[in-house]
Image (cartoon, rainbow, N blue to C red):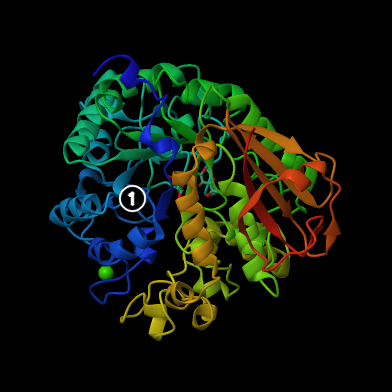
Amino acid sequence: MTKKDNTNQTKWWKSAVIYQIYPRSFADSNHDGIGDLQGIILKLDYLEKLGIDAIWLSPVCKSPQDDNGYDISDYQDIDPMFGTLTDMEELIAEAGKRHIRIIMDLVLNHSSDEHYWFREARKSRENPYHDYYVWRDGAEGQLPNDMRAAFGGPAWEWVPEVGQYYFHQFSVKQPDLNWENPKLRREIYDMINWWMEKGVGGFRLDVIDQIAKEPDRKITCNGPRLHEFLRELSRETFQKGDLVTVGEAWGATTELAKLYSNPDNSELSMVFQFEHICLDQIPGKEKWDLAPLPFRKLKEVFGRWQRELYGKGWNSLFWNNHDLPRIVSRWGNDNEYRVESAKMLAILLHGMQGTPYIYQGEELGMTNIRCQLEDYRDIETLNLYRERLEKGYEKAEIMDSIYAKSRDNARTPMQWNDGENAGFTDGEPWIRVNPNYQKINAAAQMAEEDSIWKCYQKLIRLRKEYPVFAEGEFQMLLEEDENIFAYTRTDACSQLLVICNFYGSTVEVDLEELESAGELLIGNYKDRKQRRVLGPYEGRMYWRELG
Ligand code: TEU
Ligand code: CA
């Protein structure tokens, strides 16, 4: 492989679309109410029809499931709930036949407390695995400092056997790994290489910007050694293959993203950044502290990321994942304009530069749920409820935050058809099925001419047919407009124009470019006669050749 081939200039993932599967909620093959690998294999034809290039699988490794698999107790085995290593190999092979690659979720910031390393580490300070984790001396009841864990409570947990506290940024069952230790890093690289030999097509790296923590200085995100660690990780593993790698980086700025996704391929292919995701909360507070979406700020954020990474890095494009509420309920309208707004949001995102990610059910316009507290399963949601109740919040107020932001909004079972349990399982589903499955399901939308599913299918196809999607330069239009999100993408010989009404009233557009916009590639309204009028949540994408 020459040096040039190893840079990401012409990588496959620049014109790819990636589909995220949350395995426990996707398809159950063995009647236990939990999705599994054989269930995914049964749905590969569905994914091939949709046209996606790769599947990002949320964690399927062995895990006590304290945080639905983001607490791994064996990185080189599959959790029996999901199947076996043989099932995983079969999935990679069957997906491969359909030109679909499998991207695994690497959770490298922490392991489960039931991992062999941690079971050893907690035995004594002299144990060879002790230093695989982050420990601080102390006395019981006297925490090393006041740092808090993401799922509530202190970030420190006392272990009497060693007379020390271990550090955990997430639950107590997710002790943080000590990346300062070269032996730990070596074990991680060996594990990754082992998966690469099995033929996986890439990795998503969970909270990767938190690995270089320095708890004494209260640094969790973007620690001083982060990019050093990433370059070593990449050199020892990913660079040996033609992989796609995407890091989850809540703390990413455009400047940092240019380091992560530098076209010299020294770190990762791209990162998930969350600047747009954090806009509808009170600044400086938590996601539960709801605020209306500042629309012009949303445009400013997207515009800046598009502009600054052009030629210098690579964007990921997403509205949804397993941690986020459903976009159609969040920033669209999941009522009378559900179909229009879901398509508009898809058109808006898929026209930009970067690799789009579709989260299972997004292609159907699946919506948030509102249910009793008893029906929620997520550790973050349940802890939040308890914590806020103790702090004196009203129950109704807490529930409103949960309806809007609970991670379980994304985790209800995939809606396959209008049969029992939406066709997800013929057992008892581990989490409630959204009652709207009779109306919103894959079978219906695949049969219908103008469904949301068809819109996603077409967007995926367009990205492959027109090189301007991958390479065109982004230019924001109508920056000050309070309703319209419009932009162009331009390469040497063609131009895309995307114009979307983000809200529910009809608007008139004063945009010269519309007159010469060319052919309508895709839109969410039929028979539009007046180019300059956009209906509620109307979205259009035009294409023209440049003379
Ligand atoms: O998420 C990182 C993370 O910071 C989230 O917990 C986030 O804070 C929250 O969902 C939004 O408030 C990753 C995984 O995507 C998530 O599912 C895991 O729970 C977490 O890491 C720990 O591994
Ligand atoms: Ca199952």
Which residue is at a point 34% across and 56% down the rendered structure image?
Answer: 65
Work out which residue is located at the far front of the displayed protein and give it. 547
Which residue is at a point 27% across and 38% down the rendered structure image?
Answer: 118
Q: Is residue 404 visible?
A: no
Specify whether tag 1 is near ligand 1 (CB below 8 Å).
no
Q: Tell how many labels.
A: 1
Q: Is residue 337 above or below residue 278?
A: below
Three-letter amino acid code at the position of disc 1: Pro
Mark 1: few, some, or many residues within 10 Å (few <14, many ≥20)? many
In front of the other: 195 or 441: 441
Residue 33 rendering spot, x and y as whole percentages: 32, 74
Quarter of the N terminus within the rendering: top left
Residue 14 rendering spot, x and y as whole percentages: 44, 36
Q: Is residue 296 above or below residue 448?
A: above
Question: Going by the image, does 455 lie left or right of 390?
Answer: left
Residue 426: which quarter of the image? bottom left
In front of the other: 186 or 520: 520
Which residue is at a point 58% across and 30% down the rendered structure image?
Answer: 491
Residue 149 rendering spot, x and y as whole percentages: 52, 42
Quarter of the C terminus within the rendering: top right
Q: Is residue 132 visible?
A: yes
Residue 12: which quarter of the image? top left
Q: Is residue 72 above or below residue 448?
A: above
Element carrying mark 1: loop
In front of the other: 2 or 261: 2
Q: Which residue is mark 1?
A: 59
Residue 546 rendering spot, x and y as whole percentages: 63, 34
Work out which residue is located at the far top of the displayed protein and give it. 3
